[in-house]
Image: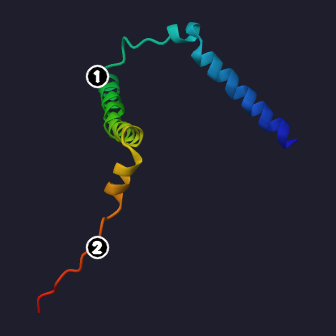
Amino acid sequence: MLKIKVALKSGFMAGLITLIASPAFARSISMKEGGTALWIFLIVGAIIILLQLIPALILFFSFIGTTTTMVFKNGKGVREEVFLQEAEPVKVKK
């Protein structure tokens, strides 16, 4: 019984999404009388979406930098940068 109920809900949702995504239904939506609030909503939404590009670009270029460092540097040079050569004792003044 539960499986039938879940299947019916899934089918109903898929049907509604298909109806909303169809071009015939999309043509009936008119933004002619939307008003100022609609345009403010659209502009603020676009700004929020575009602001998400900043951390995405930082992560992308960080990934590119890490990948190119691993590919184009020989193994010895990378090891020298990562590991300390020799630990030296530090004199403490009393």
Say above or below: 57 vs 12. below
Q: Is 61 or 78 nearer to us in this picture?
A: 78
Closer to the N terminus: mark 2 or mark 1? 1
Q: How is the image coloured?
A: rainbow
Given contact means CB atoms under 8 Å apart, are the residues at marks 2 and 1 in contact? no
Query: What's the residue at 36%, 14% (across, down)?
Result: 33
Q: Which residue is mark 1?
A: 36
Which residue appears farthest toward the right when viewing the image? Answer: 1
- CA–CA distance in space, label 2 to label 1: 67 Å
Give the left or right position of residue 71, taking residue 23 as reference.
Answer: left
The location of residue 69, given as percent across then percent down, is 36, 42
Mark 1: amino acid? Thr
The location of residue 34, given as percent across then percent down, is 36, 18
Mark 2: amino acid? Ala
Tag 2 secondary structure:
loop
The image quarter in which residue 51 lies: top left
Query: What's the residue at 31%, 22% (across, down)?
Result: 39
Query: What's the residue at 69%, 25% (across, down)?
Result: 14
Q: Which residue is mark 2?
A: 87
Q: Residues within 10 Å of mark 1 (few under 14, many from 20)?
A: few
Which residue appears farthest toward the bottom when viewing the image? Answer: 94
Q: Residues within 10 Å of mark 2 (few under 14, many from 20)?
A: few
The image quarter in which residue 24 lies: top right
Tag 1 secondary structure:
helix
Give the left or right position of residue 8, taking residue 55 as reference.
Answer: right
Give the left or right position of residue 4, taking residue 42 as reference.
Answer: right
The residue mark sitting in front, 2 or 1, is 2
